[in-house]
Image (spheres, grey):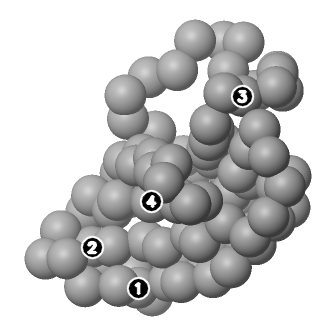
Amino acid sequence: MDNFYLCPAQPASWRVPRLPTSLVVQLWLGRLAPAVQLRVLAARPGPIEVAVYDSTGRVLYQATTHPNSTLTLEMTCWPAGTYAVRASQGTHRLTRLLLHK
């Protein structure tokens, strides 16, 4: 019952935490699907802004977190489509795509 795919495909070792040079976004299926777990790794301490946008650019989720904190995205009410997960800390920004079917 996989309803989520990560894009682009990550190598099998992508979940192994290494000290990132800026930001790393990890996404995986939660224990209670259709939730998605999200963690942001960062090279320096401090708040990280996380936002999820739909294909029209509308913000569906927004939070402030810290490195290595795990967030849960409850997507039960979200329609099928492509979502952009954006993380930013200072001048560092990273976007990952999440496909929900």
On the rendered structure, is 99 left or right of 76?
left
Rendering coords of residue 52 (x, y %): 43, 71
Rendering coords of residue 43 (x, y %): 77, 38
Residue 2 shows in the view:
yes
SS under mark 3:
loop
Q: Label 1, label 4: how many angstroms apart (C-alpha)?
A: 10 Å
Q: Label 3, label 4: how many angstroms apart (C-alpha)?
A: 18 Å
Under mark 1, the amino acid is Leu
Residue bearing the label numbered 1? 60
15 is higher (above) or lower (below) than 58:
above
The mark lying in front, picked from 3 and 4, is 3
Residue bearing the label numbered 2? 54
Q: Nearer the viewer, residue 46 or 13?
A: 46
Q: Label 2, label 4: how many angstroms apart (C-alpha)?
A: 9 Å
Under mark 2, the amino acid is Asp
Q: Quadrant of the C terminus?
A: bottom left
Dot placed on the residue nearer the N-terminal end, 2 or 4: 2
- Residue 48 image-quadrant placement: bottom right
- Specify the label residue 85 is tagged with: 4
Query: Which residue is at 27% across, 58% downward?
Result: 82
